[in-house]
């Protein structure tokens, strides 16, 4: 993990008005210049009926660690640290290419989008909206907003259903296998409960045993609303 995100002081530049939680745009001074970040203080988390209170920031960091452990590079660098409004997650801001049409790339067979769809199955993402997809180019696509993840019950809710029923490509299964064999070494238990971690292990094993992208459930809403 880089020291740049963890050591410099955070100055808050503003609040993202659309966001439902206190999601703040900030800046951290570093020797390489100012780093733009998204800071989500735990104190600003809005309570939810289906997730424990006060740990969305930890799930944000766990999602980053899983993305790194898989070498998928989907989640921008994310750390847990103190800031002006207390402990929270701090994530590097990604400058996206505004010319890229997010809806069309998100509905295509783009290989980074496919990786993201698999990542969402593993982390049990309940909130993959179009607005949580950050394209820098067609080959470099990040995702954000991973607070509503890692629930023990299946809750996958996403706009990326185009791979449903199709095989997970072998090269991605190699990453999964490596992740699965070393899962204890990624510090995930600092951020996830034993139950959440066990459910992650189970979802990973399930894909390795039956390597197909799942179909949308009929038991819960499988597309986030609104989808943007
Ligand atoms: N690391 C990032 N880089 C660039 N843009 C980001 C990043 N993180 C968030 N954003 C932008 O800020 C918006 C709000 O952030 P985010 O979705 O994480 O907040 P939220 O509080 O969970 O909001 P909501 O509940 O409305 O989804 C995102 O939709 C995205 O456009
Ligand atoms: Mg959001």
Image (cartoon, rainbow, N blue to C red):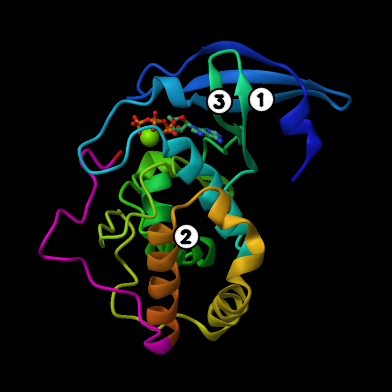
At 38% across and 16% down in the image, what residue appears? 17
In reply to whether residue 163 is colored magenta, the answer given is no
SS class of the residue under badge 2?
helix
Q: Residues within 10 Å of mark 2 (few under 14, many from 20)?
A: many
Residue 116 image label: 2
Pointer 2 residue Cβ closer than 8 Å to ligand 1: no
Q: In the picture shown, does residue 148 fall above or below 184?
A: above
For the stretch drawn in magenta, the main secondary structure is loop
The residue range painted magenta reads: 209-227
- The earlier-in-sequence mark between 3 and 1 is 1
Dividing the picture into quarters, in which one does residue 120 lie?
bottom left
Describe residue 9's horizontal placement relative to residue 68 as left or right: right
- The earlier-in-sequence mark between 2 and 3 is 3
Q: Which residue is mark 1?
A: 36
Q: Which residue is mark 3?
A: 87
Describe residue 223's horizontal placement relative to residue 56 as left or right: left
Q: Residues within 10 Å of mark 1 (few under 14, many from 20)?
A: many
SS class of the residue under badge 1?
strand
Residue contact at pointers 2 and 3, CB within 8 angstroms: no
């Amino acid at each position: 993990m880089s020291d740049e995100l963890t050591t410099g002081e955070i100055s808050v530049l503003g609040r993202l008005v659309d966001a439902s939680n206190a999601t703040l745009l900030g800046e951290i001074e570093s020797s390489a210049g100012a780093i733009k970040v998204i800071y989500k203080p735990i104190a600003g988390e809005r309570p939810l009926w289906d997730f424990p209170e006060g740990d969305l920031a930890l799930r944000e960091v766990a999602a980053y660690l899983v993305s790194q452990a898989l070498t998928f590079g989907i989640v921008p660098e994310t750390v847990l640290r103190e800031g002006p409004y207390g402990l929270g997650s701090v994530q590097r801001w990604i400058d996206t290419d505004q010319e890229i049409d997010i809806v069309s790339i998100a509905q295509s067979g783009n290989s980074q989008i496919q990786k993201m769809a698999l990542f969402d199955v593993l982390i049990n993402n309940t909130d993959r909206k179009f607005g949580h997809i950050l394209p820098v180019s067609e080959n470099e696509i990040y995702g954000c907003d991973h607070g509503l993840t890692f629930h023990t019950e299946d809750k996958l809710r996403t706009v990326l259903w185009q791979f449903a029923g199709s095989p997970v490509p072998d090269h991605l299964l190699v990453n999964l296998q490596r992740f699965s064999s070393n899962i204890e070494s990624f510090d995930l238990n600092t951020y996830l409960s034993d139950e959440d971690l066990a459910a992650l292990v189970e979802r990973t094993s399930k894909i390795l045993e039956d390597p197909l992208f799942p179909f949308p459930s009929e038991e819960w809403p499988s597309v986030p609303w609104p989808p943007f």
